Amino acid sequence: MPSENVFEQDFFASLYDSVNPWSASDEFYFHRALESGGPVLDLGCGTGRLACRIASRGLSVTGVDPAAAMLRVARSREGGDKVRWIQSDGQSLQLAERFQFISMTGHAFQALSTDEDAVALLRAAARHLDREGDREGVPEKDREGSFVFETRNPAARAWLAWTPERSRRTVQSPEHGRVSVFYDAQAEPDAGIVTIREHYSLLDTGVEKVGSNRIRFVEQEHLSGLLAKAGLAAANWYGDWHGAPFSQTSKEIIVETRRADE
C-alpha cells in the first residue's frame, strides 16, 4: 500500500490527537509557558492543542506550522480563535514580535534531516527571543527569553519498539470511531535517520491508510555544536519530563536554551 506524508494529509491530522493524547511532555511545556508570562511562540504547533491550552490561561500565543492540514485542525478546535496561527516552516520565520518563551514539542526537531536545516531553525528561534533586560520585578537570570525543545536520545534506540508486534494498539477517535494503529521502522544508524511507516485501520468502516515520515537522531554533543553555530547556549539539559538531569541512558534530550552572550 502506498504511503502519504503524515503531516500533510487531512486524514492523519484528524487522528493525531487520538493517537498522541495529552501527556507528561505537554504538561512540561504548558507549565513552563505559564511561568514565562508570555508571549509564547509554539514552533511546529501541529493541531494546536498545547497552544490553545496556554492561550486559555490568558497568555498571548502564536502557533507556527508548515502543514496546512494540521493548522486546519488547530483553527477549528475550541479556543482556536485565541491563538494567532501562521503557516510557515521555522527556518524562514520572520516576525516583528519577540517572545519570552518558545517551544518546539512532539519531537518536531527530529524532522530536520540536515545540520543546515537544524541550524537555520535554531537561528530563527534565537532571532525571536526576547532580550529585554530591565523588566521590573523579574530576576536578572530570567529576563531573557528561553527556547525549549526535545529530541530522542539515539542511545535509547527508540526505533526498536516501532514494530508491528510491539506498537499495535487500538484508539478511539471522535471522528473515525475505533482505529487500529501500528508502526514499522527502517533505521540507518550511521546516518542517524529512521523512516517510520504508520499503519491505520478504521475498524468501523474498513478504511486503511499508511503514512510515513522521516526523522533524524543526534547525540547531545552534536546538538551542542548546532546550538553554538546558531548563537544559542544551553542553560539546562534534562533527561525526562520530570526535570531529571540528562544522562547517557536518558530516553530524551530536553534542552532549555537562551541566546548566547555576544
Image: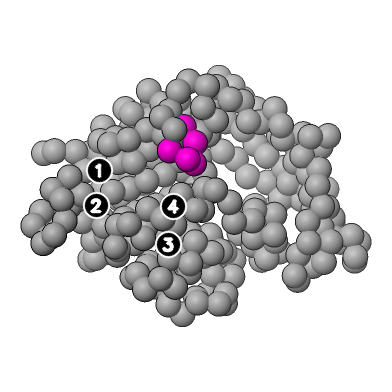
Q: Residues within 10 Å of mark 2 (few under 14, many from 20)?
A: many
Q: Residues within 10 Å of mark 1 (few under 14, many from 20)?
A: many
Who's the residue at 23% across and 61% down the image?
A: 98
**Disc marking residue 145:** 2
Give the image quarter of residue 34. Answer: bottom left
- Distance from the alpha carbon under mark 3 to that under mark 4: 16 Å
Q: Which residues are magenta?
A: 239-243
Type of residue at label 2? Gly
Residue with the mark numbered 1: 258
Mark sitting earlier along the chain (4/1): 4
> Which of the 4 image quarters holds residue 39?
bottom left
Q: Considering only vertical position in the picture, is 155 above or below 36?
A: above
From the image, give the main secondary structure of the stretch colored magenta.
loop
Instruction: State which mark lies toward you, 4 or 1.
Output: 4
Q: Residue at x 30, y 63 (%)?
A: 38
Which mark is first along the chain, 2 or 3? 3
Give the residue displayed 52% in from the left and 48% down from the top: 25
